[in-house]
Amino acid sequence: MSRDTDGAPRRRRPTQVADAIKALIVENELRAGDRLPSETELIDHFQMAKSTIREATRILEAQGIVTTRTGPGGGSFVEAVSPDRASALLANYFYFEDLTIDDIYQLRQSLEPELAASLAGRLSEADLAELEAILALYPEPARSAEEERDHHVAALRFHARLAEMAGNRLLGFIIGFMARILTDLTVYRRLYEQPNEALWREGRNHQSALIEALRSGDATGARQIMSSHMRSAHALMDAQAAEVGKRFIV
């Protein structure tokens, strides 16, 4: 593999052109739905072969930044990357990393209490009703592994929905992404195999108290409730993961 002078692997030409097109989008302040220069214009601009430009465009399509339409009025257009698409692409990276529950909760314990405090007194009754509706999905402890899995997913959806309500888009995305990979982690490792009443009670009680703090505008209380929730959930998830690991070893 060829390398640059600094020792890093040299990027393929289409990848370099794809990055240059992204820079062009930013420099020209293009927005979702705006048309990119035509293929001929890009060939002239970059002095590259048609095959290179087409591969660069395919790279951008795979990244969700560009969409191509055929027929009259067709061409390549800027496309806004949705949070779900961005999260899925990032999850593909972490899929091959040895992420642990400790890794995830280290961030959750730092970020989610601040998110909760920032939302106190700012949510509408419709927002709060939506959180209450999620909470209503697990009113009783699970009676089977299938119910336990569904409760895990719904409880994490509560946190993902809170993240979507964040005023700070970056904070909201990071927290929502953590909820997503924790959902995947619990399902892939089958951490829901045995119903865990303590985890259900801990989560539901904290989430119920959090809704009331958010409704009353109590930022300090919301921060404390979420901090307590993260600490106890972390301990219970660690214990559940250890128990599942023990069963596999046996």
Image (cartoon, rainbow, N blue to C red):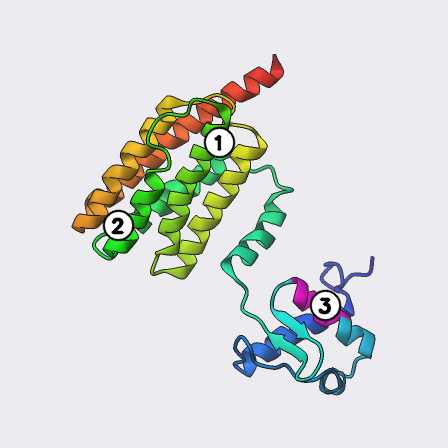
Q: Position of residue 32 (x, y in %)?
A: 53, 75
- Can residue 218 be seen here? The reply is no
Q: Secondary structure at mark 1?
A: helix
- Can residue 67 be seen here? The reply is yes
Which range of residues does the magenta coloring cover? 55-62
Q: Is residue 91 magenta?
A: no
Q: Secondary structure at mark 2?
A: helix
Between 169 and 32, the residue placed more toward the observer is 32
Q: Which residue lies at the image location 79% right of the left edge and 73% below the top edge? A: 52
Mark closer to the chain start, 3 or 2:
3
Residue depth check, mark 1 versus mark 2: number of the one nearer the observer: 1
Proximity of marks 1 and 2: CB atoms separated by less than 8 Å: no
Q: Which residue lies at the image location 71% right of the left edge and 80% below the top edge? A: 71
Residue depth check, mark 1 versus mark 3: number of the one nearer the observer: 1
Between 147 and 167, the residue placed more toward the observer is 147
Position of 228 with respect to 220 (left or right) is right
Between 250 and 135, the residue placed more toward the observer is 135
| Residue 39: quarter of image | bottom right
How far is mark 3 from mark 2, CA to CA? 42 Å
Q: Which mark is residue 117?
A: 2
Q: Secondary structure at mark 3?
A: helix
Q: Which mark is residue 149?
A: 1
Residue with the mark numbered 3: 58
Position of 1 with respect to 174 (left or right) is right
Q: Is residue 58 magenta?
A: yes
Q: Is residue 4 above or below residue 248?
A: below
Sort mark 3 into few (<14), some (14-19) or many (20+) by Cα contacts within 10 Å: some
Proximity of marks 3 and 2: CB atoms separated by less than 8 Å: no
Q: Which residue lies at the image location 61% right of the left edge and 79% below the top edge? A: 24
